[in-house]
Structure formats: structure tokens, C-alpha cells
Image (tube, rainbow, N blue to C red):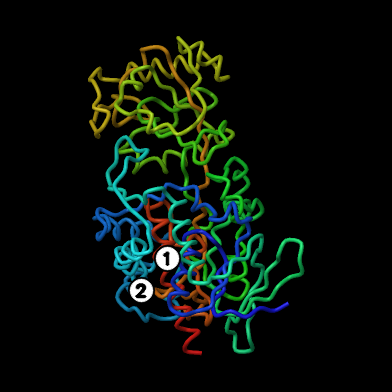
Amino acid sequence: MQHNFDVVVAGCGVAGLSAAVSAAENGARVVVLERAPEEDRGGQSRYTEAYLRMKSLTEVSDDFEVHLAENGSGSIDPDLVEQAATDPRGTSLTRSLSLADPNFIERFANEAPATIAWLQGIGARFDFLPTQFLTASQPRLLPVGGGQALVDVLAARAEALGVTFMYETTAQSLIQNDQGEVVGLKANVRGKPQLELRGQVVLACGGFEGNTEMMTRYVGPRSVYLQPVCKGGYYNRGEGIRMALDIGAAACGEFGSYHAEPVDPRSGISEPSIFIFPYGILVNKDGERFTNEAPTTVDACYEPVTRRIFEQRDGMAWTILDARHTRIPNYRLGIRTDKQPVSANSIAELAEKINVPADRLQATVDRYNAACSGADWSPLKVDGVATEGLHPPKSNWACPLTEGPFHAYPIISSNVFTFGGLKVNTDANVVNGDGDAIPGLFAAGETVGVYYGNYTGATSVLKGLVFGRIAGATAARATAAA
């Protein structure tokens, strides 16, 4: 069965909804496909607090473009990177390179303030609210009500504009004409025959963190120790990425990696994060320290630290704290789990409760305590209170663990989203292996690959909003020009 629209959007998170609203505002007839039932719509967007890396409503953070660029590729010939930056038209080679194109980053930064103003115009509210980071090096603007509020505002606007929503519907493959233009997609609807939906296509259906086969293929067999950070992540199974790669789209982003966040594996709530670990020590199941717990502020170091946790046996560690941490002002902000800590009056008792060898844990704590200078910490700022002669070192907040009761939280690495995806140009057109735009095909959100190595915090939701808006407008203009 065939249905005709101007723009077909796969995905109902903030990227897909931004695309849908933007396209509809530009006069297009739009349909949005959502794998989830209506009551669960919004993908991961509805579960996130939606931090935005902006220092005001009209300015991105000072390090915005630099941080994205520094973590925007693997090892690539620097001459090619420079050529990509200085020649927007480039060559077929530079246009299709697997890197965060400097022109893409520039447009991202330039369009972010206008996107926030656009969202305010349809009812979203923003403020600088408390975050889960007790120490932070970069400002975080937040939507009042988090990601759920953004989903609600955008969906209401889309419905008011007459956008069609199809729930429990999954995009499966792209339809091309004889000239290679994308003219629609095929979709499976639960309990019904497959549909053909014709129109310009915007792929905004997330990464592949909910697809165990793709996770194993790209991230590796140890991905069994990862879990999506929220239930919405299980809906993201990589179809948007796969169907575009199948027709020759260029890949971008680090396919073997993901955004890591430390969470409590005992909890079933969304994002049960544990950001209190810089004030104690981290030990693996053998009772041994394995990383510097506090190289800098927690917002800047939690991802690399969490990756070290993932490397441990069974992908798990324990953070060991003494009673001192409970006197940090608002310390509960750094503990989002709904589970209580394991508590004991001695390290030996704690070791027994968490099933870690007591002699090893006691020896680890003794070595750490002996390496502490005895200086008091300043927990709400980088204080340089470090260990001496200890490997691995601890660079900040290194105070001995001597005051009971002692607390322990288990930590594993969650998979907030995968890094690998499609390459797009500054207009959100998906490009092919020669760097040329694939007519009729656009992408936004985590379906677009940008990140390598270390995630630039508080940019993923913003990226979805900015390039969703761009994709919708570009697709609507392409329809009008046809």
C-alpha cells in the first residue's frame, strides 16, 4: 500500500520532531514514523535531562567548536583535514572523509542560538538549573522539564500543523528511482502489511545501542556488559544507518565506540548515574584500583573513567566512599540511583558484603590512605589534593578513607548512544562515498555520526535539535523545487 507525503520522517525524538515541525512550517505535508506506541513516543529524548552546552540563550560555550574538532576524527592525514576546513566544496575524497567536518561544526555553533529562539517561540522554556555534577567546567543550559518537555512541545506543534503520526511503525528500507534519488521508504506496521511512504526522507531514528548484533559487530563481544542508559535506547536498532549505508551513504563517527556514563546496574530507572566516585576510590572485582578517579572536574572526566570501568572483569567496578562524602553540600545530586549504597562499619565487612577479597581491598585502601597528604579537600572545586607515590595516582580530592560507615555503589558503563552513523553536509543532506549529496535523503540526531574518542558533553540533544530543524527545512524546500 502506498501513501504520498512531501516529507517522511523516521524517528520521533527531538531530532525527528524538529525536522517534522520545520518541514511543516515550510509548507510540507509530513508524516512521522515511531517504532514505539504513542504513550512511549520520544525515544531516548523523553528520558534525558537534555543538557545543552551553551553559556547563554544566544551563545554556545567558549570551547564548543574546539572540543568538537579535537574529538572529531581518528588518525587522518592532517593535509586532508586542513583541505576539508579551508575548501567547503572540497574534493570527492575530502567531502566523504570520516571526520566531523569543520564546516559542519561551524554551522552547528552558528545555528544553535537561533534554534533555541525557535523552540522558545513554540513554547519551550530554558534555564540554568542544578545539574548532577557537583563540579563542572562548562555551563549547561537546560530545558525546563527536560527532554520530555521538548518532546511534548514539539509534538504539540507538529500536531497543530497537521503532521501525521504513525506509531508502532518501523522504517525498513529506502526507495530510489532510476536516477538514484531517494523517493520514499518501506515501513513495517505492527500487525499490518508493509507500507510504501513516498516523499523526501529524513532519518532521525537514533543509533544502534538497542541492536545486540550491531553492537557486537562494531563495538565488540564485550558489549554484552553494556546496557542502554534508559528504556528508550532499546528502540534504537540502527535501521536508519543500515538502510542508508545499503545505498552507498558515507559513514562517519567512531563505529566501535559510544557515549559512556557510569550507572548503577541494580536500578531499573532511567539514567541511574553515579557521579560521586571522585570523592572515593574505584576498585574492580579483585579489590584493586585501576584508574585516576579524579583527574579533573567530573563533567569532563566521567566518560574516560567509565571506559576504564568497562575494561574491568565483567565490565564492573565499585566506588568505595567513607562518611566524609555525606557532608559535601548537596552530595545527593551526584547520586541518581534509586538503590541504597552497601554500607558497613569496616572495610573488611564492606568487602564481604560486595563479594570482593577482603585482604586485597584492605591492602588497596591502606596503600591509598598512606599516599594521601593529609590535606583537607575543597569538594566543590578542583583542589589539587593529590596522592604521592601511588599508581595510578589520584589528582584531586584525595583524602584517606577512615571514617565509617563506609559506602559502596556498583558501577557499570551504560551506552547513552553509539558514535557511528551517517555523514551529512551542512544542509543535513546525507552524502555518498564520493561526498555528493544523495538527493531526497537527509539525517539528524544520533543517526548522524560526529563523535570520536571522547564525547563533547551536552551537545547530542542540541545537535538533534539544530540539524533536525535544518533537515526539515531543506527537505521541504527540495519538495517545493521538484
Q: To which quarter of the image does residue 85 belong?
A: bottom left
Nearest the camera: 203 or 92? 203
Q: To which quarter of the image does residue 87 belong?
A: bottom left
Identify the residue shown where x is 44% and y is 22%. 320
Q: Where is residue 399 in the image (x, y as percent from the top left)?
A: 30, 21
Identify the residue shown where x is 47% and y is 26%. 283
Q: In which quarter of the image is the N terminus?
A: bottom right
Q: In this rendering, would 312 be left or right of 79?
A: right
Q: Position of residue 169 (x, y in %)?
A: 66, 63
Kindly identify which numbered label has been placed on residue 99.
Answer: 1
When the figure is inspected, residue 380 is found, relative to residue 202, above or below; the finding is above
The residue singled out by tag 2 in the image is 84
**Amino acid type indicated by mark 1:** Leu
Q: Is mark 1 on a helix, strand or loop?
A: loop
Q: Position of residue 413 (x, y in %)?
A: 51, 40
Which comes before the other along the chain, label 1 or label 2? 2
When the figure is inspected, residue 427 is found, relative to residue 479, above or below; the finding is above
Kindly identify which numbered label has been placed on residue 240.
Answer: none
**Amino acid type indicated by mark 2:** Ala
Q: In this rendering, would 397 be left or right of 437?
A: left
Marks 1 and 2 close (CB-CB < 8 Å): yes
Crowding at dot 1, Cα within 10 Å, few <14 / some 14-19 / many 20+, comes out as many
